[in-house]
Image: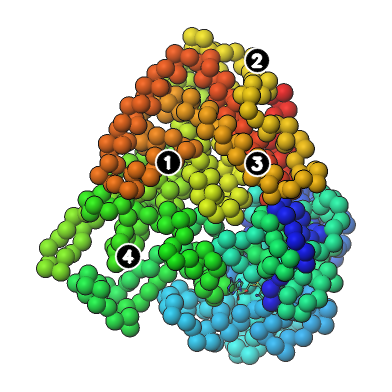
């Protein structure tokens, strides 16, 4: 099944009315903070399930109404018994206990609706991938050790749900069940894994998982999708709309397929590209900023000499494909053949996300035969990234994380390659600034420097040294968030479905810049402009931009929305391209590090000279460095102008981020409100 557009649809329009869930389940971590029925935050005195046979409940409700609505399902689906048999989460990886509880609730829904279980490959119209996921069907060429493990966990999980259902029915729970006795549970669990979606609150926090009506569940994946989705409650969904899409195979409207949860977050689909009549509507099931794949060879006795000569018998080794393709394979068991994945030569975005600069081979990136070595190198870099992120998240050590990431980005790394005549060849390589590991490093650095700033101010905000250090951290955080937004924007120009992460990145850049503008340390600079003097009027004084006016009237008239989108984007880019060089030297001026090598975070043309001749890598960076340092000094002389420019830049980023957010999530999205809120304080 697939879903197609019933009419021509411009960018940034809702495609469906709010689609209700068939079933929902909170994650274990949110059971005591959110209502198990409607997913809203719990009040201070939450409600327990009604008809309470036990005082020790694992779930709570926000109101008596939610409790009376959901409690019968909680007990009759045997979710209650499952909690008592398995109070701790069974697995940390797929399928999780949340998936198991969701499948129990779904079985009950299906039974109540008299849905047939005669075909375990499709239940209630939804594909289960039952044979593929439980390894009953011959697998394709991907041969991941993990596959057997996932399949084993699915069968174990299904057995656990079957035991809970036996407990509910008063049957013996200590008998050994045959596979046939939990086949329905296994198939519905596979259905959950194939069709469920993470349900987020308005701040983007994952609350649980849900399976939605066919109108949503029939939508296939693409790595270059034309639609996105948002969650809303029954109260904030906006006006009712007809379905503008329909399942293609049956030709029937999706409108007839009603979800049965009376409350709980609903889903609305939205176009993020212009969609032609009858064109397939596609969403992404994975992170679009991941590269396509990395093919790793992992038979340890594999001869490097054979590889060097390219004289390889494919039966001799095992492929492990990771990243987008592998994620889709391990969760959904399909190999993506979308136009981005099939592109030959590799699409520009995928080329950048995987590119490694080999510095002493006289070529910028990996030659085609170099994949094995490139992938081995990538594994090492990804391990370094994980290690640094771990310092930040697990050990609350943002300083150490920043140091490790700066080294990861700045250093030339060494790889030793065995040549056919048995010599070790040392090769130097460096991450490309648009590599996916670089992008993740920018993201982590932006928040780790922010946390370092807050830590310093919390220590003693009156101490001059702490204030100065905190200001330096704030500048670095702003610089990395601007670099992340600029780099992603560069990729977005060739892959417009990146609009979803991009809207977030521009908003974060705007927020971080605004917090830098508000630092009290400015008042101690000579000619530092006082904060009260800076207002929206300073933004409009850039003279070129109608972004502010447009934001207020975004897409409310009948103009050509596709053209308007292009026009707003071009205006925004013109403005930020103008302003950024005026502040970049200032925000990267102190402390050195990787940022010194970034000539301009928005206009990335300087990258071309790096990739066309790597021997210029160092020199180019140095000359850019000198120029920027020079302009940095000038900027310090003119704090007043610098601060106004930073303010203008922050407002532009916030407004454009909000503009993109209305395209992806509609005019009432929480992100748009957030920006309006921030700006109303600046008015
Ligand atoms: C949520 S369902 C989508 C609807 C599904 N096509 C159906 O017939 O019900 C997800 C499943 O659809 C299939 N699928 C989705 N996107 C695909 C793609 N780009 N290529 C191949 N199969 C895809 C996979 O089997 C996947 O596990």
Residue 266 vertical placement versus 390 (above, below): below
Residue picked out by circle 1: 605
Residue 307 location, quadrant: bottom left
| Circle nearer the N terminus (2, 3) | 2
Residue topped by disc 2: 532
Pinpoint residue 145: horizontal percent, then vertical percent.
Answer: 42, 75
Q: Secondary structure at mark 4?
A: helix
Can you give x and y, in whole percent of width and height, for residue 671 in the image? 68, 42
Q: Earlier in the sequence, mark 1 or mark 3?
A: 3
Query: Of callouts 4 and 3, which one flags the residue occurring earlier in the amino acid sequence?
Result: 4
Whole-percent x, y for residue 92 in the image = 54, 64
Contact, mark 1 vs mark 3 (Cβ under 8 Å): no
Is the CB atom of the residue marked by disc 1 within 8 angstroms of ligand 1's nearest atom?
A: no
Q: Residue furthest top?
A: 526
User: Which residue is found at the position 68% from the left and 47% from the top?
Assistant: 563
- Circle 1 Cα neighbour tier, 10 Å, few/some/many (<14 / 14–19 / ≥20): few
Q: Are marks 2 and 3 in contact (CB under 8 Å)?
A: no
Reply above or below: 139 against 261: below
Q: Which residue is mark 3?
A: 567
């Amino acid at each position: 099944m697939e879903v197609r557009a019933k009419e021509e649809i411009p960018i940034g329009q809702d495609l469906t009315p709010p689609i209700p869930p068939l079933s929902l389940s909170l994650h274990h971590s949110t059971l005591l903070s959110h209502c198990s029925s409607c997913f809203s935050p719990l009040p201070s005195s939450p409600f327990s399930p009604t008809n309470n046979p036990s005082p020790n409940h694992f779930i709570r409700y926000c109101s008596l109404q939610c409790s009376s609505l959901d409690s019968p399902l909680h007990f009759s689906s045997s979710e209650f018994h499952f909690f008592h048999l398995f109070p701790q989460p069974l697995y940390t990886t797929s399928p999780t206990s949340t998936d198991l509880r969701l499948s129990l609730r779904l079985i009950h829904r299906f039974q109540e609706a008299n849905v047939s279980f005669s075909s375990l490959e499709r239940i209630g119209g939804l594909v289960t991938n039952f044979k593929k996921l439980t390894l009953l069907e011959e697998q394709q060429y991907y041969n991941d050790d993990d596959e057997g493990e996932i399949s084993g966990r699915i069968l174990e999980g299904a057995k656990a749900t079957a035991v809970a259902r036996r407990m509910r029915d008063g049957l013996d729970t200590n008998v050994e069940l045959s596979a046939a006795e939990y086949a329905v549970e296994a198939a519905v669990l596979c259905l959950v894994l194939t069709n469920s979606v993470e349900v987020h609150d308005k701040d983007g926090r994952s609350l649980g998982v849900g399976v939605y009506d066919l109108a949503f569940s029939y939508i296939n994946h693409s790595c270059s999708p034309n639609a996105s989705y948002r969650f809303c409650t029954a109260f904030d969904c906006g006006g009712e709309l007809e379905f503008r899409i329909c399942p293609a195979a049956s030709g029937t409207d999706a409108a007839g397929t009603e979800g049965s949860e009376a409350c709980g977050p609903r889903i609305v689909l939205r176009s993020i590209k212009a969609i032609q009549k009858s064109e397939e509507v596609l969403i992404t099931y994975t992170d679009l900023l991941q590269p396509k794949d990395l093919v790793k060879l992992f038979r340890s006795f594999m001869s490097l000499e054979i590889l060097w000569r390219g004289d390889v018998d494919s039966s001799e080794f095992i492929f492990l494909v990771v990243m987008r393709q592998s994620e889709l394979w391990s969760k959904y068991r399909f190999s993506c053949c979308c136009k981005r994945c099939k592109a030959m030569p590799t699409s520009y975005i995928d080329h950048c996300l995987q590119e490694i600069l080999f510095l002493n081979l006289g070529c910028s990136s990996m030659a085609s035969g170099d994949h094995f070595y490139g992938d081995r190198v990538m594994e090492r870099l990804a391990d370094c990234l994980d290690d640094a992120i771990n310092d930040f998240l697990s050990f609350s050590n943002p300083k150490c994380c920043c140091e490790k990431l700066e080294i990861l980005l700045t250093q030339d790394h060494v790889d030793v390659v065995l040549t056919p005549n048995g010599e070790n060849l040392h090769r130097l390589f460096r991450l490309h600034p648009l590599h996916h590991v670089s992008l993740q490093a920018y993201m982590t650095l932006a928040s780790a420097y922010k946390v370092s700033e807050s830590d310093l101010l919390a220590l003693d905000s009156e101490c001059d040294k702490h204030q100065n250090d905190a200001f330096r951290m704030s500048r670095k955080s702003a610089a990395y968030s601007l670099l992340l937004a600029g780099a992603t924007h560069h990729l977005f120009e060739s892959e417009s479905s990146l609009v979803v992460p991009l809207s977030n990145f521009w908003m974060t850049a705007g927020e971080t810049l605004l917090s830098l503008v508000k630092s009290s340390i400015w008042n101690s600079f000579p000619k530092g402009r006082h904060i009260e003097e800076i207002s929206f009027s300073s933004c409009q004084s850039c003279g070129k931009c109608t972004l502010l006016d447009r934001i207020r009237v975004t897409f409310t008239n009948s103009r050509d929305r596709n053209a308007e989108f292009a026009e707003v984007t071009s205006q925004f880019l013109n403005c930020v391209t103008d302003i950024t060089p005026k502040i970049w030297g200032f925000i990267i001026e102190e402390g050195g590090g990787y940022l010194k090598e970034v000539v301009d975070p928005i206009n990335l043309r300087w990258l071309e000279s790096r990739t066309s001749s790597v021997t210029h890598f160092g020199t180019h960076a140095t000359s850019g460095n000198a120029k920027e340092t020079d302009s940095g000094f000038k900027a310090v002389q003119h704090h007043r102008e610098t601060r106004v420019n930073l303010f203008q830049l922050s407002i532009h980023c916030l407004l454009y981020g909000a503009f993109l957010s209305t395209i992806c999530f509609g005019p009432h999205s929480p992100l748009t409100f957030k920006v309006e809120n921030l700006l109303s304080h600046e008015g």
